[in-house]
Amino acid sequence: MKVGVLSLQGDVREHVSALISCGINPVEVRRPSELAQIDALVIPGGESTTIAQLSEIFGLYQPIRERIAAGMPVYGSCAGMILLANNILDSKAGQKTFGGLDITVRRNAFGRQVDSFESDISFADGSSHLIHAVFIRAPWVEEIGANIEVLATIDEHPVAVRSASILATSFHPELTHDHRIHRYFLEEVAKPALEKVK
């Protein structure tokens, strides 16, 4: 499986490092030709409007939308969750997303940068161990569609969700040394989705 990390802005290096720790040699995606080489994509945390704008400048916006619509497995953390959501609340005027995930998210739901926090939360991957979650100007999910599974919540707000081929977290597992989320994406989301395509 060839996995790419969208490398336009945000914590790209941290996602690359996490994937390497999971036995993956990721492709840093900045051009359509690099996108064409991969089977699955990770969209990092960062600034969602900036990533969307840069994806248009680099000719990646429409190709990514089309690949997601065609079933390419994708994982997005924080800004990545916003970019994968079909609907955004409190968005900047004209903000675009890649879409594909039938959720409505609220940007900066937990507050500004000074309100960033860390918490140990349950993650529904079959493990009883809590996962250390880092929230930085994080969104949360306000509404979910019929085919969305909630994997983690804080104060009843979903902060990790998945569909058949997409995983999104409002927190940043790439900023910790626990690569459970990345392994879950590779083993439980990407691999089964790619096997269905074959």
Image (cartoon, helix red, strand yellow):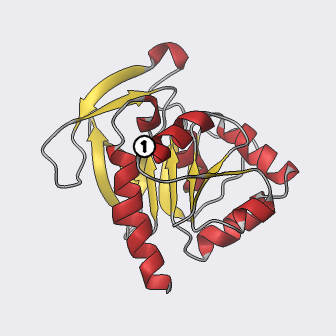
Where does the image place residue 164, in percent across and percent down from the top left?
Answer: 41, 70
Q: Answer yes or no: is residue 86 visible.
A: no
Where does the image place residue 33, in percent across and percent down from the top left?
Answer: 79, 64
Would you say 79 lies left or right of 135 here? Answer: right
The answer to whether 64 is drawn above or below residue 78 in the figure is below
Where does the image place residue 34, in percent across and percent down from the top left?
Answer: 74, 60
Q: Answer yes or no: is residue 182 visible.
A: yes
Q: Nearer the viewer, residue 179 or 87?
A: 179
- For the point 71% across and 62% down, the residue is 35
- For the point 29% across and 42% down, the residue is 153
Q: Which residue is mark 1?
A: 21
Where on the picture, by quarter, is residue 48?
A: top right
- For the point 79% across and 62% down, the residue is 32
- For the point 42% across and 47% down, the residue is 142
Amino acid on which the number 1 mark rests in the picture: Ser
Badge 1 density bin: few <14, some 14–19, many ≥20, Cα 10 Å: some
Would you say 73 lies left or right of 65 here? Answer: left
Would you say 31 lies left or right of 2 here? Answer: right
Q: Please identify the residue farthest to the left as the structure is shown.
A: 128
The answer to whether 186 is drawn above or below residue 105 in the figure is below
Q: Nearer the viewer, residue 75 or 191?
A: 191
- Does dot 1 land on a helix, a strand or a loop? helix
